[in-house]
Amino acid sequence: MYATASLQNARTPVIGDVSVTNSTSTSPCQIRCSSCTLKHVCLPMGLTTEDVERLDNVVYFHRPVKRGQPLYRSGAPFNAIYAIRVGSFKAAVVHDDGREQVTGFQMAGELIGLDGISTEKHTCDAIALEDSEVCVIPFQHLEKLCRESETMQRHVHKIMSSEIVGKHGLMLMLGNMHAEERLATFLLNLSQRLKARGYSPIAFQLRMSRAEIGSYLGMKLETVSRTFSKFQDQGLINTQQKKIEITDLEGLKHIIGR
Amino acid sequence: MYATASLQNARTPVIGDVSVTNSTSTSPCQIRCSSCTLKHVCLPMGLTTEDVERLDNVVYFHRPVKRGQPLYRSGAPFNAIYAIRVGSFKAAVVHDDGREQVTGFQMAGELIGLDGISTEKHTCDAIALEDSEVCVIPFQHLEKLCRESETMQRHVHKIMSSEIVGKHGLMLMLGNMHAEERLATFLLNLSQRLKARGYSPIAFQLRMSRAEIGSYLGMKLETVSRTFSKFQDQGLINTQQKKIEITDLEGLKHIIGR
DNA sequence: CGCGCTGTTGAAACTTGTCAAAGTTTGTGG
DNA sequence: CCACAAACTTTGACAAGTTTCAACAGCGCG
């Protein structure tokens, strides 16, 4: 009852595409969206039971990605978007001259790959920050679902739009904020997303290097490091390399408020 | 034959919404997408004749916006996206503390308003940089079209995705580039878009102030002004206030290439 | 014709970047 | 399991680029 005959038929070629274009193999999915622990923060968030069951028919394959390995690279053909089931990723665009800009960090439950829709080729690299696993969402199938279900369609549109809105926020940060404000914004954002996933919002492990944080925030790694140290001196956080403990959440918020 | 009965019926409430939520009135459209001179650069770009005719049924109202006036403001309810028919706009997000970041400049044929989809409220201000006119595209109607036509659906998805990709480029600029590279990028981007619209790519009138350019590029207006002067000294451009003439296109490109 | 807004230019101050060195952690291979 | 190498982080000193503050010029508008 979960898979209609037409979807079964339509699915076959896409599976082929995926295995051709990606060197890593995919594996059938044990866990359905409808029973996934991440459904409150992932694609299914806010959807009706019926729509989630439709998703179950489309999200059928998982793909493991080892730390440091790409889920996809810039220029790779676009077939699917991905929901992160385990682990985390960075997305980065690389300029001709080699300059890299990290455009986002994604964690479990978040989507990655929307950049590829426009040209049907991915326009950035998606690299796993730790051993991870993604759910493969063949985009053609998702589009079919959106034509069949108005609520699903609106949902997908909202996800894309919030991606745009999120980038606006980043632009505001990159264009207007000082190093301290940027790092505080970054930490608070991370904290909030971890909280939404049931993790501690005040003690966590960074998955990315200082250089990657710096690239994302538009500053050099030394400045990131110095700013961490400054926060530590001010009693706002405790850091030990990648281990972060926020000791004064309000203080951090106050930095952004100037 | 252009308007089906069902669309006629569906349209009425949306018209109501538009006139309620916007203080400015809209007027029926004389010009159809299918006969619009901007169709090669606007929403209809690349669509089949059939799809464009479907658009004709949906894009029915125009709205004039005087220079300096908002098309919408942050927080306003989202009903429609807009295609710029005449003139140009800036989109800007405003931080709590009053800091403003211009997130984009839109010119004729470009879409504005996608930011509102995610929360059904607009998240930025859209302000006319000159006396302008937009085509109102009720989003619910566009979504209906996308459910009916696969090519239209993919088209709209591509537009949203390229908005995301475009922001990535901006982030790269804000995060990695020096003042000269930023301004050169800005000028070349403008030049290219004007060219695509049949205007001179090397002589044009800026519609925005130095402060607005600065906000967009993440630098202060004085730095913008100084950088313009530097380009002028280097023989790359001629500026007289808002009038710009690019005298060495390759030279400008070379600045970005470092 | 003057007033205000916008743009230009200069000098000093500040923030961040650059370069360099040393310390720390992580991972690998013996 | 330890040792060593590689990668990452921290910190300092100095340089460079941008902002800030200030003054003035030019253009458009009433």
Image (cartoon, coloured by chain):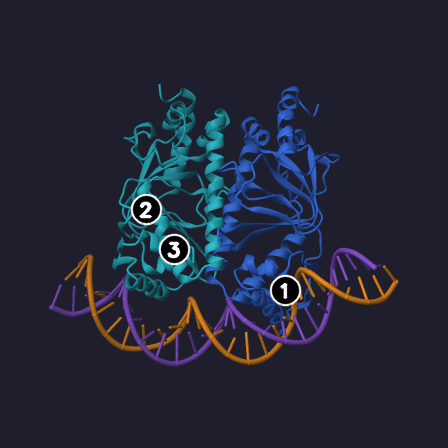
Chain colours: A blue, B cyan, C purple, D orange
Q: Is residue C4 left or right of residue B34?
A: left
Q: Quadrant of residue B38?
A: top left
Q: Nearer the viewer, mark 3 or mark 1?
A: 3
x, y percentage for residue A61?
A: 69, 34
Classify C11 as above or below A146.
Answer: below
User: Is B183 on the left or on the right of A243, as rendered?
Assistant: left
- Residue B135 x/y as whole percent: 34, 37
Give the distance between the C-alpha atoms of the residues marked 2 and 1, in whole angstroms. 42 Å
| Number of the front mark, 3 or 2 | 3
Give SS at disc 3.
Answer: helix
Residue B254's label in the rendered image is 3
Residue B119 in sight in this render: no
Amino acid type assigned to the residue bearing label 3 in the image: His
The x, y position of residue B105, in whole percent, is 37, 49
Which residue is denoted by mark 2 in the rendering?
Answer: B88
**In the displayed structure image, the side of residue A83 where residue B202 appears, left or right:** left
Q: Residue at x 67, y 29 (%)?
A: A57
How far apart are the two marked residues, 3 and 1, measured between alpha carbons?
46 Å
Which residue is nearer to you in this view: A176 or B224? B224
Q: Secondary structure at mark 2?
A: strand
Q: Earlier in the sequence, mark 3 or mark 2?
A: 2
What quarter of the picture does the N terminus of chain B occupy? Answer: top left
Tell me, for residue A249, which label it has, or none. 1
Residue B168 disc label: none
Amino acid type, mark 1: Leu
Q: Which amino acid type is shown beneath numbered disc 2?
A: Ser
* Helix, strand or loop for disc 1: helix
Label 3 Cα neighbours within 10 Å, binned few <14 / some 14-19 / many ≥20: few
Of A213 and B122, the residue lying toward us: A213
Q: Are marks 3 and 2 in contact (CB under 8 Å)?
A: no
Q: Quadrant location of residue A79?
A: top right
